[in-house]
Amino acid sequence: MRPKTRTGWCLSAVVALGIGALGLAPVTSASAAAPAKPVSPGMVSAMQRDLGLTQAQATARLKAEATASALAPDARRAAGKAYGGEWFDAGSGKLVVAVTDAAATKAVTRTGASAVRVAHSAAVLDSAKSALDTAARSSAGAPAAIHSWHVDVKTNQVVADVQAGAENRADVKAFLAPARAAGLLTVHADSTPAPRTYSAGTVGGDPYYINGNVRCSIGFSVVGGFVSAGHCGTPGSSVAGWDGSAMGSFVASSFPGNDYSYIAIGNGWWTVPVVLGWGTVSDVLVRGSNVAPVGSSICRSGSTSHWHCGTVLSQGDTVNYSQGAVYEMTGTSVCAEPGDSGGSFITGDQAQGVTSGGWGNCSSGGQTWFQPVNEILNTYHLTLVTSS
């Protein structure tokens, strides 16, 4: 059976297909810390364009972020029960860990991270957010005027994004009451559109097609196939590649509640540990899935708007789509457009997640959320395909 190639690109699990380096010898591994590698010139140029950095600033930031991500587990353990969250501070180039007592401050500092004192632990904040999640899972759900909610580790608050003018409505105030009563609520009222998923009808480009009439983007290669967004298809849905030939089918999918899926491939398609740069940057090798802290730079690849970068704004978000709430998402300042759903979010060479939805576009800007890839791997017992 002929291999699936196109102008030298192997089309498999990476955003919208994948990719130019056919000489790669992919290996599989769990999400282990990768040794230091040279930064990608393409990633640097994209960060210069989207984050307004110089070449030297982008290079230094990528190296500092990789160090912060590797340090985070030790710093988190050092904080213990006093842990209040963590983020990457671009100004200092260091990991910052919030803690609730002086002893934890000293322990965290000894790991090499910075420490700041806060009033509330992450456990307290997560509990307040979980109360809202529980209400959203009820038959009534969350009011449509509440677009999302998340723990903001920098302000030590639970933040709810609410449509401007609706913040004092009775249903909105009632839904947010548990967090407000705990003294942990901050309401952001703005006029941004409600978040939506980014699947699309069939158009040209480098997509994968679901049942012949929906287009999404491939996320990351896993052993046996690839992962993508859950709203793109349901178990048993057939999948075709860019050339219309049979690719495989959805084995598992979850949406709403979650927004992820696993697609098994065959028919001559194979997997490679690469994210497509779309000519904007060089194709990026995937070497692991260490989680990037809040404040880190992050880039996204998708079959409609191709390659764009921004920063991680928040983690553990709940996003209230018209189809229902989705939990444990990561919020970013990266733009996206219909058809980008399922596509790759990556920081440096570390896989972060698959595109879910958001608001705005890549002409005027916007915000996009992704479902973390490690949750998908753990849920479906999958192994990320990585490069050595």
Image: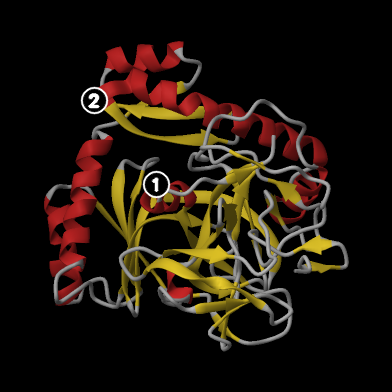
Secondary structure found at label 2: helix
Quarter occupied by the N terminus: bottom right
Of marks 2 and 1, the one in the foreground: 1
Please tell me whether residue 262 is drawn above or below residue 69 in the rendered image. Answer: below
Check disc 1 and report its element: helix, strand or loop: helix
Across and down, in percent, residue 216 comes to 58, 74
Indicate which disc, 2 or 1, sits on the residue closer to the N terminus.
Answer: 2
**Residue at point 23% right, 35% down?**
120
Question: Could you say where residue 160 lies in the image, as x and y percent from the top left?
Answer: 31, 60
Residue 138, quarter of picture:
bottom left
Residue at 50% across / 40% down in the picture? 291
User: In this view of the protein, can residue 196 be seen by the observer?
Assistant: no
The Cα–Cα distance between marks 2 and 1, rounded to whole angstroms, is 25 Å
Task: List x then y, in percent, for residue 367.
Answer: 52, 64
Q: Amino acid at mark 1?
A: Asn
Residue of label 1: 378
List the residue tagged with mark 2.
Answer: 81
Classify residue 106 as left or right of residue 11: left
Q: Nearer the viewer, residue 21 or 305?
A: 21
Q: Residues within 10 Å of mark 2 (few under 14, many from 20)?
A: some
Is residue 257 visible from the viewing direction of this image? yes
Question: Is 297 positioned to the left or the right of 251 in the image?
Answer: right
Quadrant position of residue 163: bottom left
Crowding near pointer 1: few (<14 within 10 Å), some, many (20+)? few
Q: In this orientation, which residue lies closer to the viewer: 278 or 313?
A: 278
Which percent across, then down, holds residue 233?
46, 76
- Identified by mark 2, the residue type is Lys
Q: Residue furthest front?
A: 1
The correct choice, above or below, for 285 with respect to 150 in the image is above
Name which quarter of the figure residue 260 lies in: bottom left
Which residue is drawn at the image coordinates 36% and 42% (left, top)?
Answer: 155
